[in-house]
Amino acid sequence: MKKYICILAWAITFPIMAQTNKDLNSIVQQVLDHSPALKGQKTLLSVGETKSQIQKSYADPIIAYEAGITRIDPVSKASFGTALTPTVLQFQPNMNYNTNFSANQVLFDWGKNALNIEKIRLENKLTQSQIDVMAFGMAYQIATVYHQIHYLKNVLAIQSSELKRIKDQSAIIEQQIKLGEAIELDAMGWRIKVSNQENKISETSSQIGKLSDFLETQAGKELKKELANTVTLSQSSQGSIENNPSFKQLEAEKAVFEQEINVQSKSSLPTLSGVATLGIRNGYLPRINGETPPIEDDFKINSMLGIKLTVPIYSGKRALYQQNIAKIQQERVNYLKEEKNTQLAYEVRQGEVNLKNLQDKMALQGKVIEQAKYAYKLSEARYKEGTIKQYEIDLAQNTLEEAQLMEENFRLQIKLQQMDLLKAKGLRFWEN
C-alpha cells in the first residue's frame, strides 16, 4: 500500500514542465499583455528613462542668450579745466545696453552626477521588479480561476451523469404507472429529483460562465478555444523561495537606499565649471560734457572666459539627515526580507504536508467511490425487484454523487496547493 501511495505521489509531483499546458500559458500571457493595470505601471519605466536622460544632461553645457537695458543714476563724473569752461568726463553712461551669449560647462564634479545617474537606474530596476511582482500575482490568480473552471467542468459531468440515471429511473416509474405497478406519488418524487438535479447543473454552468467571462475580460478576447480542453498545471520540484520575485523587489529597494547614501556622502564636494560669454555692450567710451559718442564707437564686442569653483560650506546637515533616513530604510528592508523568508519557508513546509495529506485522501477516496458504485448498483437491482423503497436508492445515489464530488474537490485542492508551492518558489510556469 505504501509503495502504491509513493508511486502516486511521485507521479503527481514529478517535474512535468515538458508537458506544460500551452492553453493555460497562452491565457496567462494574453492577460499580462492586455492588462491596463500592468501597462499603466510600465509607463513608469519610460518616466525613469526620461529622468536618466535629464540627469545625464547635467554634464552638457548650458548655453543661453541674454539681453538687457539698465539705467544707472547717478554715475561717476569728473570735471577738468577752469571754472568758466569746465570739461565734464562721465566714465559710464546712464543707459547701459548689453546683449550676449553665455555658456556654462561643468568640468569636474567629483562623480556626483554619475552617482545620481546610477541611482535613477536602480530606481528603474526597482520599478521593473514591482511590475514583475504584480504580473506574478496576476498570473497565479488566472491559473487559480483556470483550475476552478476545470473543477466545475468535472462537477458538471458528474451532475449530468447523475441526472441521466435519475431520468432513467423516472422513466421506469412512469412506465410502471402505466402498467399499474406504481402510483403517481412515486413518479412525483422522481420528477422533483430531476428538477433539483437540473437546478444543480444550471447553477454549475452559471459559475463556469462567470469564471470564463472573468478570464475573457482580463484577456480582452474570447477564450473558447483555450478553455475547450482544460488541462491542469502539475507540480514541479524545481525552484526555491530565493527565486520569489518579492525578494528581488526588496533587493532592488535596498540597492536604491544604498545608492542614496553614496549620493548624499558626496553632496558637499565642490563643482568645477567653465564659464564664457560673448556679446555686445556700450559704454566703452566716456561721455564728455554729456555727449553720446557714435554707436559704432560706443558699442563693442566683448567676451569673457573663466573657471568657477563652487564649494558647498553649510546646508543645515540636510545630507546627513538624508543618509540617516536611507540607513533606516535599509534596516527596514532587511527586516522585511527576514520576515518574507520565514513566511515563505513556513508556507512551503505546510504546503508539502498538506499536499501529502490531500494525496493520501485522494487515494482513499478512489476506494470510497468504488464502494459507493457497488452499493448503488446493488440498491438499483434490489429496487427493481421491489425489496427496498425509493428513499433507500435515493440514499445510494446521493452517496455516490457526493463521493465523486468529494474526489473532484480533493483534486482541485491538490492543484491549488501545488500552485501555492510553485508560487512560493517563484516559478514562472507561463514562460516555460
Image (cartoon, rainbow, N blue to C red):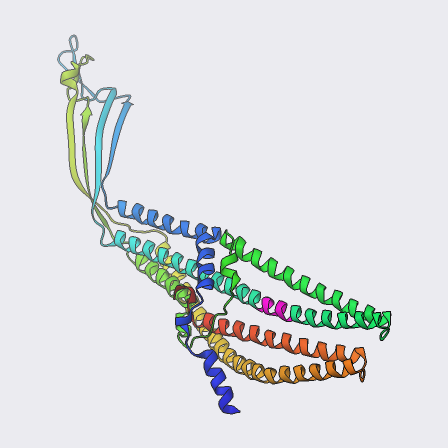
Q: Tell how many labels.
A: 0
Residue 112 vs 204, above or below: the answer is: above
Q: Is residue 173 left or right of residue 128?
A: right
Q: Quadrant of residue 278?
A: top left
Task: Look at 52% across and 66% down and name the residue there.
Answer: 230
User: Is any part of residue 317 visible from this angle?
Assistant: no
Task: Look at 37% across and 62% down and name the residue there.
Answer: 252
User: Is any part of residue 301 visible from this angle?
Assistant: yes
Residue 68 vs 323, above or below: the answer is: above
Residue 157 drawn in magenta: yes
Q: Residue furthest top?
A: 84
Q: Nearer the viewer, residue 40 or 36?
A: 36
Residue 76 drawn in magenta: no
Tell me the magenta residue range: 151-158
Q: Nearer the viewer, residue 100 or 48?
A: 48
**Residue 61, x across and y down, in percent:** 22, 41
**Residue 84, x across and y down, in percent:** 16, 8
